Image (spheres, grey):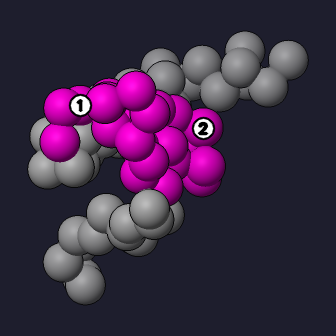
């Protein structure tokens, strides 16, 4: 099963995520950021993936503000 987690057109870029079921658990994988989220339903895994993506973006912004990107590149 494939799904897109999209925001409103003018707010954020679209990231493609795949959602699949394995052993009764739903797993979302965002290849663009190489991150995963897990849940008991497609709705729960989509909600959790949004939280993980938002956390990832906020942490990335913090690292840029602290000029850590040079450390990350090395």
Q: In the picture shown, does residue 63 fall above or below 61? A: above
Q: Is residue 15 magenta?
A: no
Does residue 73 show up?
A: yes
Mark 1 packing: few (<14 Cα in 10 Å), some, or many (20+)? some
Residue 52: image x %, image y %? 31, 33
**Secondary structure beneath label 1:** strand
Residue 39: image x %, image y %? 23, 31
Which residue in the structure is indicated by mark 1? 39
Q: Nearer the viewer, mark 2 or mark 1?
A: 1
Picture quarter with the C terminus: top right
What residue do we see at 45% from left, 65% from top? 2
Q: In the picture shown, does residue 4 fall above or below 65? A: below
Q: Is residue 27 magenta?
A: yes
**60 or 17: which is nearer to us?**
17
**26 or 55: which is nearer to us?**
26
What residue do we see at 31% from left, 30% from top? 24
**Secondary structure beneath label 2:** loop
Drawn side of residue 47 relative to residue 3, left or right = left
| Residue extent of the magenta highlight | 18-41
Q: Quadrant of residue 51?
A: top left
Mark 2 packing: few (<14 Cα in 10 Å), some, or many (20+)? few
Dominant secondary-structure state across the stretch colored magenta: strand
Q: Which mark is residue 34?
A: 2
Residue 41: image x %, image y %? 17, 42
Picture quarter with the N terminus: bottom left
User: How far apart are the two marked residues, 2 and 1, measured between alpha carbons?
Assistant: 17 Å
Does residue 48 show up?
A: no
Closer to the chain start, of discs 2 and 1, is 2
């Amino acid at each position: 099963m494939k799904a897109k987690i999209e925001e409103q057109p003018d707010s954020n870029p679209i990231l493609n995520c795949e959602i699949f079921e394995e052993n009764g658990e739903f797993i979302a994988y965002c290849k663009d950021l190489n991150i995963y989220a897990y849940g008991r339903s497609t709705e729960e895994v989509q909600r959790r993936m949004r939280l993980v993506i938002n956390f990832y973006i906020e942490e990335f912004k913090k690292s840029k503000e602290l000029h850590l990107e040079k450390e990350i590149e090395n």
